[in-house]
Image (cartoon, rainbow, N blue to C red):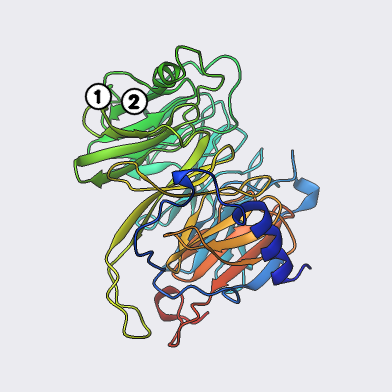
Amino acid sequence: MRSRVAVLLAFGLAALAVPLAGCESLSLPATPQVPTWLHHPGGVLSVTYRRPLTAETRRQGEAYERGQPALDIERRRIFVGSSDRGLYALHVEDGSTIWRFETMGPVQSEPLYDADEDAVYFGSNDGALYKVRGKDGSLLWRFSTNAEVTRRPVIRDGVVYVVNANDYLIALEAKTGELRWHQHRTPAFGMEISGYAGPALGRDKVYMAYSDGVVLAYDLRDGSEQWPLVDLAAEAEQTAGGEAPRYLDVDTTPVVSRISSGDVVFVGSYAGGVFALDAENGTRAWVNDKALGVTELVMWEQPAHQPRTGPMPAVPAQRILFAASGLTGLWAMDPNDGRTLWRRNLPEGGITAPVPVGGALLVGTTRYGLFLFSPVDGGLIDGIMPGGSFAMTPAAHGVRAFVVGNGGAFLGVQVEPPTPGPTTGWYGWKG
């Protein structure tokens, strides 16, 4: 295993040591803030446990583990898929298996856990959406969508919304799995970026982005279109002077939020940049057309707080929209106007979506391990190389995170704030 210092040097040389050219390289606030705990140059990340998970004899396809775990905080369980065609329920304390549910294809999706029913919804590369009991993994229903399901479903008022790789948006009765309605767009012809967007819920709409560059909103009840067609591929073509973009995709799951001008939906067009669209009618609120190649969007929020140490002023509440791109790097943007706060190159091979944990951002890399960033300036806080690479996005709560590495091992990770005082995890239990 490489040392922490060697890993930090490798990552720093690949991603952080060389500033980006121009004013976008370090467009920081006049007084850069820090996470809730103070910046520390190492010793913050640690592996609390590691256990083999993926059964090599059942593994299919490429040697990657994708998706993201789902957390059941109250019952202290973790639900995570695997390339060995299984969905696992694990104990949070040590990662031991509670049960395993077998499908007919790799499970490379993020499950949805519904605490009200103690049920788990998840997709498989076999083309189906499954609903199983949380306590024992017994099957409640299975709905075949006829294409792989890798994005997280969403649920509201007894209806589950799910998207498959053929650009079908499907609404199902949560109790029975019966079809309520569906919408479909013909996938774009020609070159596409791997992956696709998932559904996002607004106040009375479900939002969806497609591989042909179109973003639409549908009525939650009957699936009727609520926006005029929003074609971000056409926007990108105009920006490029009339030249058709090579890639049309909008692969980011929309992020529904509120800014100073009202409710908006954030989406990332591979060729056109990051857009904020009015949640009611789809009109553009702003666009950052420099953030190209974006495949993941994450909203980070930090409440106002008083620093734990020293006579320091109170830190105000803050919100930052993060965009991850294998083409142009990791972007931090002001959600109100799209202004670039900072941008960093990514290490060769790219990173997972950034995940808020302990006031910072945790990412996995496909070559260099796990790393912790400061959200406010992109500074590297810590990094570890726990014996493998990561394509799966970690899941986090409090100061704990969980992820399956590409080698098939399940890891529990701890973020240890270096400031004095007690450190607790979920609702008071230590570590």
Q: Is residue 368 left or right of residue 174?
A: right
Residue 82 x/y as whole percent: 65, 49
Q: Residue at x 70, y 70 (%)?
A: 5
Q: Residue at x 67, y 65 (%)?
A: 8
SS at mark 2 in the image: strand
How far is mark 2 from mark 1, CA to CA? Answer: 8 Å
Q: Label 1 is placed on what type of residue?
A: Gln
**Relative height, residue 292 to residue 107 (above, below):** above
Q: Residue at x 58, y 64 (%)?
A: 90
Q: Quadrant of the N terminus?
A: bottom right
Asked whether the beta carbons under mark 2 and mark 1 sit within 8 Å of each other, the answer is yes
Nearer-the-camera pick, 11 or 422 = 11
SS at mark 1 in the image: loop
Q: Is residue 46 left or right of residue 71?
A: right
**Relative height, residue 131 to residue 290 (above, below):** below
Circle 1 sits on which residue? Answer: 226
Circle 2 sits on which residue? Answer: 216
Nearer-the-camera pick, 284 or 153 = 284
Residue 96 x/y as whole percent: 64, 68
